[in-house]
Image (cartoon, rainbow, N blue to C red):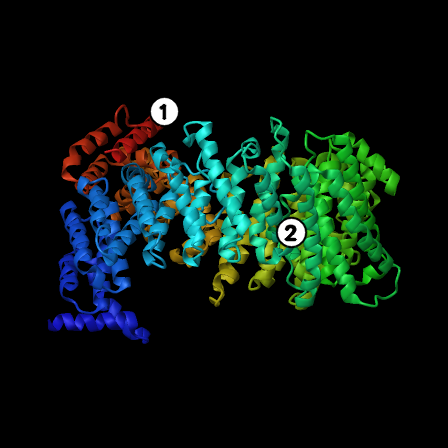
């Protein structure tokens, strides 16, 4: 008892002490209970005899960890299960809630893990019925256990293969889930009059968990509306078709208790989402729909509970599910449809009036109306949908509510606005085009009526020298921004097939003309002085968004010829009679933004639009005809575009020059290329003439950073051999020394080295076979020699630097880019690397040596901690093992083992590509061993001798890797089994003894009664496999391995 008292004191300190050192000491002392299976009996002793809740919590949580992390014998798991259920029955009502919760989790976990192992685990639900027939405390414990059991069965556990989890979940679904749902319904009926009871919440929560079960293994996100239909099994049909099932959830909502109403609505949302095929016939399904419609209509009539925000949100979701799961013809033929659609419209209009309170819920309401109107063309029968009456009102309500709310926003905080949140704005506007185009003429008249007075005020302000009230102009700009966004959203989709395309095109022209008219004045007069204002930036964002959608609909390659009605009307209104004039207007606005703005947001948006236009073949050709584009191509300097001198916009430079590059290379002219590169040539000349003592200045630093970003953009635009030769001949040999000079002087400044190295990484990338030189050309070798100098220069200097606080930004980032450069250069297929050793050139050897030093300078834990570093590291290893394995084998044994060990660690990565790269590298290593050592009488090359020596010193390397590979195939859901099968066969052929020992290990870890069956599976693995690694033999083994895996998992 004295020891128990000490343990209780330790538990008290573990859970309650404010001293971290004291807590750490207690945790270390008590850790043995959760990691050592010998302490399981001690945990039971604590549960039987301890008097403090914290000791009981320690015992239950330790048992939970033991059950989760160890493969305990079947009888022991049954004993734990039986002990816990009896413990809860006898002592549960007297325990603290957190102890009860931990014990329940333990019971459910051990039940889940043993579900497929013994029938007694599957009797859990029947045993729990005894709890439900007893007084309140036991009733509550029974419901809590069922809640946790459904939750436990529905979620996967770390370390448990997903396929095994699905087998358990499906078995539980088929055998017990319906019974539990019926228990929840029975409990709800019994407790309906038990006002304020906690049991009501538990029973309702249990119903929701059952309806939210992942019936089909799709793992949908329950927080999202996009869970689609609920795939309830057909065996649930009697329970769900019973009208009392739907009604009980409406009744619980009507109790109007916050703790119940939200979950009652969530249950109704899922019931409204049941698959159509669940119902036997249309009559039954329509009866179910009628019940839903009546229930929701009563809520709309009374408004009960809708003042609570959570209820309001769930109710909007419920309304949204009507059209998501039922056809419009089903709805309009319902007896109460007329009242329901009227009440829903009134509810939507009220929601729009208070949209700030309901902004997150409007998505579902607008989505409902959008789906309703898009179904009208397919509506059959004479029953009126009544949408003509309500949809225009909703559009008007949406527009007016946005504009009316702006005054309040301006009085509160100008900086917080939905216009600044792209995702929320997209959600708000997604449904508007469908609604507007349904009654396009009426809706467009309203939008024009609202827009024209505001536009008139804005145009008058342009004529003034100074604005009397800046806030008033900001309000006008923000209103215009909203209207332009709405017009842009309308143009995002094409007109409905059921309406006249020509008439809608004319209306598109009317709306577009107002926006284009706005563009003509937005950069004139007083407005030229407002580029720093947030409201002005919001308006320009909206205009750019409008251009994006208008361009795709009416300016892209084929659309312009089929849009005669639009351009006829634009010609009448604005004199814009074809798409080339509109394109000129768009480019003019882009150029103005690039000249006048200094902020990253507008510059980035403008360049994105410019890039999209230049990427289209015909649109790009049209751009080259425009004087504005010609000016940009020949005058791309900071004197004309100040953002190029703003360091905050340095990332946008790459996009800018990528676009310019696309336009330059469309003309396929060397003269055009050289002329266009003059601004960059001037920067090169300036930097090359800078004295050594002046290199480490900010002026040089920022000029070099900008130049590298610019060149990367130009390189990214190249997709042909001829264009690449233009750039390469322009750079080499005249300007390549500047890159080396930049690395040598700025190696300790990542701001400089990162863009420089990224440019080189782009330069060596053989995209679209652009780096294929003529057979007589030495350019591939010359390029690699320059790359080697750069990597050696950077690597030798960065390795000598001390480790700073932010080691990733200062060192690791540059190192992984260097790895990427070397990987791309080695796999580009434009260099015969044999010539370097043949002629005594150290370029390849030096590059590989410095890459190895950089690899070894980074702890493996850090390599795995930074994703981009991980990807670059393993990509380089795959290349080295594939094409330069002799370099790897000639390393000393400790270095070789470190690299080989990192491959084994990489096999356990979550990234499938990394796993495949590691498997490929291991396969190349084992293939070399098999061909040169296993098949050979004796190793006959230095590399083979070295490999034999490495393996002799560490004989456990191959067995460990083979074990890891088998564990991946057998126990994980690997999507790259083909890649993993390659090294497995190579390892098996390397040593038959090794594979025999592994087979014995795996069999020993399995239950005795299953070992004979598994042994036969192993024997089949090598059926028809011979002692070779040719493709046919490998493919046969892959088939055998797939069969072996399936038989093993279905044992």
- In the picture provided, is 383 more to the left or to the right than 620? left
Residue 170 or 648: which is nearer the viewer? Answer: 170
Picture quarter with the N terminus: bottom left
Disc 2 to disc 1, how far (Cα)?
Answer: 48 Å
Q: Nearer the viewer, residue 793 or 9?
A: 9
Indicate the secondary structure of the residue bearing disc 2.
helix
Number of numbered discs: 2
The crowding category of the residue bearing disc 1, from other C-alpha atoms within 10 Å (few below 14, some 14 to 19, many at least 20), is few
Which of disc 1 and disc 2 is earlier in sequence?
2
At horizontal 24% and vertical 27% (from top left) the residue drawn is 1020
Instruction: Report the side of 125 relative to 830 (left or right).
Output: left
Describe the element under mark 1 as helix, strand or loop.
Answer: helix
Q: Position of residue 960 (x, y in %)?
A: 27, 45
Asked if disc 2 and disc 1 are in contact, CB closer than 8 Å, the reply is no
Residue 903 appears at what percent x and percent y? 37, 47
Q: Nearer the viewer, mark 2 or mark 1?
A: 1
Mark yes or no: residue 532 visible.
yes
Which residue carries the number 2 mark? 736
Q: Quadrant of residue 462?
A: bottom right
Image vertical order of residue 324 relative to residue 845, above or below: above
Q: Position of residue 651 (x, y in %)?
A: 64, 55
Above/below status of 860 relative to 623: below
Say which mark, if any, is on residue 1032. Answer: 1
> Quadrant location of residue 535?
bottom right
- Quadrant position of the C terminus in the picture: top left
Note whether residue 733 is visible: no
């Amino acid at each position: 008892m004295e020891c128990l008292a000490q343990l209780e004191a330790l538990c008290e300190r573990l859970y309650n002490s404010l001293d971290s050192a004291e807590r750490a000491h207690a945790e270390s002392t008590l850790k043995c209970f959760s990691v050592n299976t010998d302490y399981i009996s001690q945990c039971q002793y604590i549960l039987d005899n301890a008097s403090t809740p914290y000791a009981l919590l320690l015992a239950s949580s330790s048992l939970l960890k033991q059950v989760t992390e160890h493969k305990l014998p079947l009888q022991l798991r049954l004993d734990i299960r039986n002990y816990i259920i009896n413990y809860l029955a006898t002592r549960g009502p007297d325990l603290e809630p957190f102890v009860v919760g931990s014990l329940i989790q333990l019971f459910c976990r051990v039940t889940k893990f043993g579900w497929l192992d013994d029938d007694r685990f599957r009797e859990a639900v029947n045993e729990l019925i005894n709890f439900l027939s007893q007084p309140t405390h036991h009733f509550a414990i029974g419901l809590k256990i069922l809640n946790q059991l459904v939750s436990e069965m529905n979620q996967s556990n770390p370390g448990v293969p997903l396929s095994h989890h699905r087998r358990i979940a499906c078995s539980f679904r088929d055998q017990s889930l319906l019974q539990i749902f019926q228990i929840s319904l029975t409990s709800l009926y019994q407790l309906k009059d038990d006002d304020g009871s906690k049991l009501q919440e538990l029973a309702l929560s249990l119903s929701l968990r059952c309806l939210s079960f992942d019936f089909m293994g799709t793992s949908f996100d329950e927080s999202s509306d996009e869970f689609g239909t609920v795939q309830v099994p057909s065996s649930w049909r009697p329970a769900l078709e019973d009208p009392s099932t739907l009604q009980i959830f409406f009744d619980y909502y009507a109790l109007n208790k916050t703790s119940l109403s939200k979950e009652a609505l969530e249950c109704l949302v899922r019931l409204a989402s049941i698959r159509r095929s669940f119902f036997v016939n249309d009559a039954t399904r329509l009866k179910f729909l009628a019940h839903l419609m009546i229930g929701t209509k009563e809520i709309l009539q009374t408004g009960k509970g809708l003042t609570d925000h959570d209820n309001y949100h769930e109710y909007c979701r419920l309304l949204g599910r009507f059209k998501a799961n039922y056809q419009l013809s089903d709805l309009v033929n319902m007896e109460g449809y007329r009242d329901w659609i009227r009440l829903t419209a009134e509810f939507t209009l009220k929601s729009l009036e208070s949209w700030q309170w309901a902004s997150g819920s409007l998505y579902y309401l607008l989505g409902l109306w959008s789906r309703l109107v898009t179904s009208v063309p397919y509506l059959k029968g004479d029953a009126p949908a009544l949408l003509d009456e309500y949809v225009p009102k909703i559009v008007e309500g949406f527009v007016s509510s946005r504009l009316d709310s702006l005054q309040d926003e301006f009085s509160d905080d100008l900086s917080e606005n939905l216009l600044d949140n792209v995702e929320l704005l997209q959600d708000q506007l997604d449904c508007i085009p469908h609604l507007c185009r349904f009654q396009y003429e009426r809706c467009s008249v309203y939008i024009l009526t609202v827009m024209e007075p505001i536009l008139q005020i804005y145009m008058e302000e342009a004529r003034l020298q100074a604005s009397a009230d800046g806030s008033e102009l900001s309000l006008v700009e923000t209103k215009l921004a909203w209207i332009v966004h709405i017009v842009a959203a309308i143009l995002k989709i094409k007109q409905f097939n059921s309406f006249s395309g020509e008439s809608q095109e004319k209306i598109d022209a009317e709306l577009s003309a107002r926006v284009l008219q706005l563009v003509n004045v937005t950069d004139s007069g007083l407005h030229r002085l407002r580029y720093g204002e947030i409201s002005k930036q919001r308006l320009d964002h909206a205009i750019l968004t409008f251009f994006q959608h208008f361009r795709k609909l009416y300016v892209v390659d084929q659309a312009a010829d089929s849009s005669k009605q639009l351009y006829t009307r634009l010609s009448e209104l604005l004199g814009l009679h074809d798409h080339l004039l509109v394109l000129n207007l768009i480019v003019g606005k882009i150029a103005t933004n690039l000249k006048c703005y200094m902020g990253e947001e507008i510059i980035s948006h403008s360049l994105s639009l410019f890039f999209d236009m230049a990427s289209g073949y015909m649109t790009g050709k049209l751009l080259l005809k425009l004087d504005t584009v010609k000016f940009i191509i020949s005058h791309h300097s900071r004197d004309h575009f100040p953002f190029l001198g703003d360091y905050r916009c340095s990332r946008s430079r790459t996009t800018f020059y990528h676009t310019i590059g696309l336009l330059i290379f469309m003309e396929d002219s060397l003269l055009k290329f050289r002329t266009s590169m003059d601004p960059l040539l001037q920067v090169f000349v300036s930097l090359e003439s800078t004295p050594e003592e002046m290199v480490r200045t900010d002026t040089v630093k920022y000029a070099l950073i900008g130049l590298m970003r610019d060149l990367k953009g130009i390189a990214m635009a190249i997709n042909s051999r001829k264009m690449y030769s233009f750039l390469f001949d322009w750079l080499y040999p005249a300007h390549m020394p500047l890159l080396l000079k930049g690395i040598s002087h700025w190696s300790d400044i990542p701001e400089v080295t990162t863009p420089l190295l990224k440019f080189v990484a782009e330069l060596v990338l053989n995209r679209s076979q652009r780096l294929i030189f003529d057979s007589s050309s030495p350019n591939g070798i010359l390029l690699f020699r320059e790359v080697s100098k750069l990597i050696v220069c950077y690597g030798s200097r960065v390795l000598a630097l001390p480790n700073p606080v932010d080691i990733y930004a200062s060192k690791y980032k540059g190192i992984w880019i260097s790895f990427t450069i070397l990987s791309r250069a080695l796999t580009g297929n434009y260099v015969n690397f044999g010539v370097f050793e043949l002629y005594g050139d150290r370029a390849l050897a030096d590059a590989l040596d410095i890459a190895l030093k950089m690899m070894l300078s980074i702890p493996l834990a850090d390599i795995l901690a930074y994703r981009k570093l991980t990807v670059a590291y393993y990509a380089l290893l795959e290349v080295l093992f594939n094409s330069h394995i002799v370099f790897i084998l000639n390393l000393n044994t400790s270095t070789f083992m470190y690299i080989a060990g990192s491959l084994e660690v990489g096999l356990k990565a979550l990234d499938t590509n990394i796993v495949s790269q590691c498997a490929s590298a291991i396969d190349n290593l084992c293939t070399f061993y098999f061909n040169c050592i296993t098949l050979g009488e004796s190793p006959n090359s230095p590399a083979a001798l070295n490999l034999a020596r490495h393996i002799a010193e560490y004989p456990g390397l191959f067995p460990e890797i083979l074990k890891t590979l088998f564990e991946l195939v057998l126990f994980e859901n690997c999507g790259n089994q083909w890649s993993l099968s390659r090294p497995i066969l190579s390892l098996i052929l390397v040593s038959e003894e090794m594979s025999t020992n592994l087979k014995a290990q795996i069999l020993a870890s399995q239950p005795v009664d299953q070992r004979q069956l598994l042994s036969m599976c192993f024997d089949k693995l090598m059926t028809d496999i011979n002692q070779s690694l040719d493709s046919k033999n490998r493919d046969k083994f892959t088939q055998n391995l797939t069969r072996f895996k399936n038989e093993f998992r279905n044992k």
